[in-house]
Amino acid sequence: MKTIRERFAPPDAPLIALLAAGAAALVAREITEGRLLYGVALAALPALAWLTAKPAILIGALGATLPLVQNLVGASGGGYNVSSSDLLMVAIGGGILLERTAARPVPIRRALRPIAAPLIQYGTVMVLLFALHPLDVAHFAKTGQRFELFLLPLAIGAYAALRNLHLGLLKAYLIAATALAIAWPFDHGLGQKNPVGQFIANAILLFLALPALRRFLPCLLFLIPGLLLTQSRGAILATGVGAVVILAIRGFGLRFIVSRGVPFALAAAAAFLLLPGSYQSRVTTISPGQSTPAQYAIYIREQLTTDAKKIIRAHPLTGVGVGEYYAADSKITADPVLDPHEVLYLQAAEGGYGLAVSFVLLVVGLAFAVWRMKNVPVAAAAAGVLIATATHGLVDVFWVRGTPVLGFLLVGMACGSLLRERENIE
């Protein structure tokens, strides 16, 4: 099969030099006029375009940047964010589209057929909602990013598995999450504790589910304490739920329990006992109140839920529009938020009860499809991370900070791996 570089031969050297000079001048102008971010982005575009012909590099970089969700375009005020992983996913998606022109393109669409039903029903509801709300650029961008957060990862995951690149992505993610677990206690500017906690939790679940990652056992010495130090109760709960799902798919064999479960349980118990008393108290507090910071956090969540219910009651059928929760919340409270910290309330507020039901069908449908693929090595990880992230979304943010991307990537990998095994794709 021809590669992109073989099908699209580079132009002559003088033309390359001319284009490079023009691009350099444009970048220099943006930087000198104070638009450093745009200058850097423009400078990176040629490299990204060139790298579309090198999927292994881009896919590995995607795994390493998934835990880095800092918004590159500043405060969005409405749920639209651009992180480094967003740029990489778009670049990889562009490369995949270019490869569609090859004689034998990677059969991504065929790989994703087992999950077509839940995808089509959710996508259809999203498109209908888009048509029912004001058709402006901002609404288009926010709706488009919502599709990017689940459709692109599914396609990229399938592509990576079909090209046998998926383990490289997962290893890069595991290393990046371990680095985050080490660094975050010293620099909270690396991310808000709840998404950081979920990124670390996902890495733990990858280790539990995939024998191919057993050489990364020492990472648990940093991942488990790092998870507890975030004090994210939702991420800790999600880890437990995901571990149960993984065990249910892989089976409760003695070898698996000894090689994975025992080290995990011992490390978790030791890390918890070594935590300061205030940390232990926060992690174990589950009731609202105003006496301690842990109780107050739950109290605030209840206030957010109350506000979300008001928005839902006012817009029960079509919601306020995808990414418009902040604008709606600002009309009923002096301290509006981007997300009510409960994904079903967010979906109902954005798109009415229909979108909330459609989201449930999406997650359940994907999980059921992956369950049927449980003989595929990556299936247990896919189900565990998907369900864990959705569980965390019931008590915290889901779409806004990009935490669900790894789960959808893994589902795509499971689909791609299944087709690769069935058709002996090399």
Image (cartoon, helix red, strand yellow):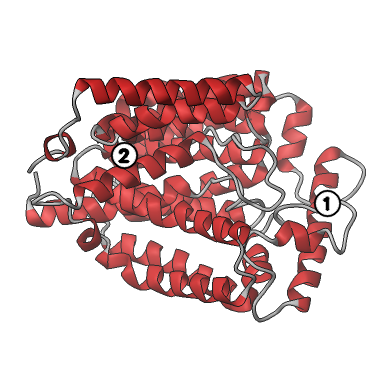
Of residues 143 and 181, which is closer to you in this image?
Answer: 143
Q: Is residue 256 visible?
A: yes
In this rendering, the answer to whether 353 lies above or below 157 is below
Residue density around tag 2, few if under 14, some if 14–19, many if 20 or more, within 10 Å: some
Q: Amino acid at mark 1?
A: Ile
Above or below for 347 versus 295: below
Q: In the drawing, does residue 420 fall left or right of residue 82?
A: left
Find disc 1 in the rendering and name its residue.
300
**Residue 352 x %, y %:** 64, 75
Q: Amino acid at mark 2?
A: Leu
Does 347 sit above or below residue 269?
below
| The N terminus, quarter of image | top left
| Visible residue check, residue 212 | no
Q: Which residue is mark 2?
A: 210
Mark 2 residue element = loop
Q: Quadrant of residue 38?
A: top right
Between discs 1 and 2, the one toward the N terminus: 2
Q: Who's the residue at 71% across and 52% down the image? A: 338
Q: Residue 224 at x, y = what percent?
A: 54, 30
Residue 266 in picture, x, y percent from top left: 50, 29
Residue at point 82% right, 65% down? 306
Q: Is residue 83 above or below residue 252?
A: above
Q: Locate residue 107 relative to residue 294 in the image: left or right.
A: left
- Asked if disc 1 and disc 2 are in contact, CB closer than 8 Å, the reply is no
- Left or right: where 343 falls relative to 306: left
SS category of the residue bearing label 1? helix
Left or right of residue 108, residue 262 in this image: right
- How far, Cα to Cα, is label 1 from label 2? 38 Å
Q: Depth check: 228 or 103 in front?
A: 103
Q: Nearer the viewer, mark 1 or mark 2?
A: 1
